Amino acid sequence: MSSNIQPASNGLFWTTLDAAANWSRANSLWPMPFATACCGIELMSTSASKHDLSRFGSEVMRFSPRQCDLMIVAGRVVMKMLPVLQRIWLQMPEPKWCISMGACACSGGVFDTYAVVQGIDRFMPVDIYVPGCPPRPEQLIAAIIELQAKIQKTGTLRATEFADRTTPEGPARFDGDELVRIRDRNPVQFNLPVYDPRH
Amino acid sequence: MMNSTEPQKIALEAALSAVPGPRAWSTFRDSLRLNIDAISLVPTMTRLREVGLNMLIDLTAVDLLEYADATDRYRMVYQLLDTESGARVEVRTHVNDPEPKLPTMTTLWSSANWMEREAYDMFGIVFTGHPNAKRLLLPDEFASFPLRKDYPVKGRGERHNFPVVTRSES
């Protein structure tokens, strides 16, 4: 129980509205599973009986963003999927939080290719990052407990704490031509082993 | 010793005798290859379809840029199968920049539909007469052809070209 909720001598509790709202929000997170890759399997395992995410007050996975307040992005996000992800995020009602689960969602992981977004935090806000490839269910549970602590620490009744986050929170945006320049600095080596196209 | 593909080659050569254009046969691990010019692709493939190669298993392209001996830029590879006898033939033809263009095979094998779209998507080879000639995998607004060898592996910044949603406005 939050330290902001104090028992009074006559058997009643007194608290602030913020703390009461935070306490209830933090302990009934409704995750929206945005599972696009193998991290999704760990996400399913986390909510299944063995690891049992419901012990920590966030078992109600809903596949409609209108009913959720925690987006868990589990897996790599490609160019075609990013507008979908942003749209789903915008459809979720306030207050809402986002967990970026796994190396691919956090940074693109090993998929440093033309089509894979190099970290969702470049284009949408992220509250908690979970490293790993894929992370263990325990790591996701730890992230959710961490997020609960964050909600209890920073949350407000009317969710005004989000208004301050006006700037993009991810790494600085790539210059569009930077990758071309990298390629120019490291030109194709024409003395590579030669493959006979006719075998 | 006679090569195991030799009877098949003789039979196909006889079937194709009316088709003009140069043909070069080769063998790789008991499978027969036929190299033809792009101009004789349609009559050759039509004839091969008639003699029983009724399934187009695979259709793909290869970018031969930076290959030492290559004389052409793109190679199209068609894998054909006769589902009754099990005979297989690989047909190869070549196209070049600036406008790599080939007739579609969807009129002969409808399985060519998506495979030609993918070849266009990745290599920019245009298939004239294709019923649905648009990109298969990449977004429609994607401007390049990423499996060409002169395209950088990390792209030209397409993956960064999105609006940023900040927390205060979402």
Image (tube, coloured by chain):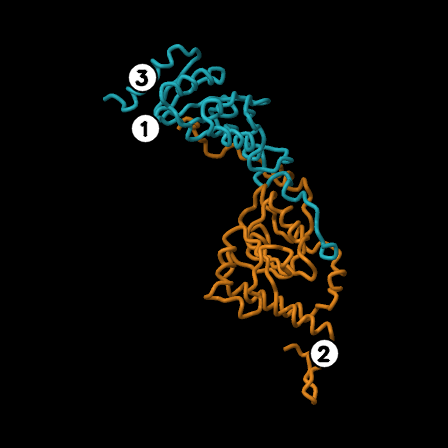
Chain colours: A orange, B cyan
Indicate whether B148 appears above or below A92.
above
Q: Nearer the viewer, residue B85 or B96?
A: B85
- Determine whether, in the image, residue B66 is placed left or right of residue B4: right
Q: Is residue A188 above or below residue B93?
A: below
Q: Amino acid at mark 3?
A: Ala
Measure the alpha-carbon separation of dots 3 and 2: 91 Å
| Cα distance in 3D space between marks 2 and 1 | 79 Å
Residue at the disc numbered 2: A15
Q: Which residue is mark 3?
A: B11
Q: Give the structural element (helix, strand or loop) at label 1.
A: loop
Residue A20 pos. (x, y %): 69, 74
Q: Position of residue B8 (x, y in %)?
A: 31, 20
Of mark 1 and mark 3, the one earlier in the sequence is 3
User: Residue B86, labelled with which disc?
Assistant: 1
Q: In which chain is the residue bearing label 1?
A: B
Report whether mark 3 lies on the same chain as mark 2: no
| Same subunit: marks 2 and 1 | no
Q: Residue at x 56, y 39 (%)?
A: B153
Q: CA distance from mark 1 to mark 3?
A: 15 Å
Q: Tell me the quarter of the picture where residue B100 sits.
A: top right
